Amino acid sequence: MTSTASLRRALLASGLGLAALAFVGPAAAQAFPSKALRIVVPFAAGGAGDLTARIVGAELSASLGQPVTIENRPGAGGVVAAETVARAEPDGHTMFLMSNGTAVTASLFKSLPYDTLKDLAPVSTLGTFDLVVVVPAESPFKSLGELVAFAKANPNRLNIGSINIGSTQNLAAELFKSSAGIDAQVVPFKATPELVGALRGKQVDVGVEILGPTLTQIKAGAFRALAVTGKKRSGLLPEVPTAVEQGVKDFQASSWNALAVPGKTPRPVIDRLHKDIVAALAKPEVKKKLADLNIDADPSTPDEAAQLLASDIKRWGAVIEKAGIPKQ
């Protein structure tokens, strides 16, 4: 009798517990937002990532009826900002400006104070940045095919410029080597201005960089764009074919950013944020503001954003291993 009664009590308690859990999601969504929100940005103020967060944050503030503040926490490859959000209360009021750099960091660091895939929940991508392969205007290479043909005929004669080791641009240069099947030297520079100077001074033969910072040089005729590395041609350079179009089939790489929340945030709260983000990115004036930063507004579902993060961690991890880049 005692065991039967205990079993009944256990089943009743379990049923009540499940019923209570069933109400957590809707209750959380109805109460959200209950206070000011913040977006933690792993970059300094004034850059494209920071400005993207401010543009979208202003729209979310209007639609959610609460202030949205931007908290800049650069440093350690985005680890400081990511940990801040991973450890925050999972109620949707703290968001993280995630990027492909988040995936690179997960692949490049030996250990992190959080689990990138478990402790951060992507809500939606915000936009993508094209990368471009450029050469000086005086270069003999008129297409990516010509460049690859030269590199194959002259192993290790080609110098490919990028910025810092482990950056998206640097890893994209390594991906170009492996995708094209060429032996070439990847030369890293501290920042874009140094890379631009090296290209103009013909210290390197070719550069792989985000399109935005090189667009002025391309438009002025100082650089020739051989290829963009996205899934499709860039609206800023519609005449320039993608690397895939030119036969380098696996050379596809884009920078992207997204908004994420702590991993245990209730799905109804994520869905509410997702709905408002998608609505914001659909506005012509928001698209225009992002386009002025050379960013294509590109929302996704939470699941698609999570899949993008996971696939980039795997892909960049393989590139890092093949290039022999030591983990930090």
Image (tube, rainbow, N blue to C red):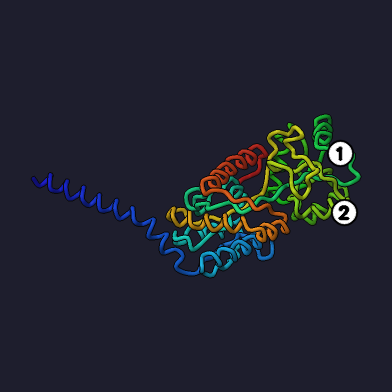
Q: Is residue 250 above or below residue 102?
A: above
Question: Which amino acid type is shown beneath numbered disc 2?
Answer: Ala
Q: Is residue 262 left or right of residue 238?
A: left
- Write down the residue under mark 2: 220
- 85 on left or right of 140: left
Q: Residue at x 39, y 55 (%)?
A: 25
Split into 4 quadrants, where in the image is the N terminus? Answer: top left
Left or right: where 254 falls relative to 20? right
Residue 258 in percent (x, y) is at: 59, 53
Q: Residue at x 82, y 55 (%)?
A: 216
Kindly identify the amino acid type of the residue bearing the numbered disc 1.
Lys
Outermost right residue: 138
Question: Which is nearer the N-term, disc 2 or disc 1?
Answer: 1
- Image coords of residue 279 (percent x, y): 57, 57
Q: Is residue 110 visible?
A: no
How busy is the neighbourhood of tag 1: few (under 14 within 10 Å), some, or many (20 plus)?
A: some
For label 2, the SS is loop
Label 1 sits on a secondary structure element that is: loop
* 241 is higher (above) or lower (below) than 73: above
Residue at the disc numbered 1: 142
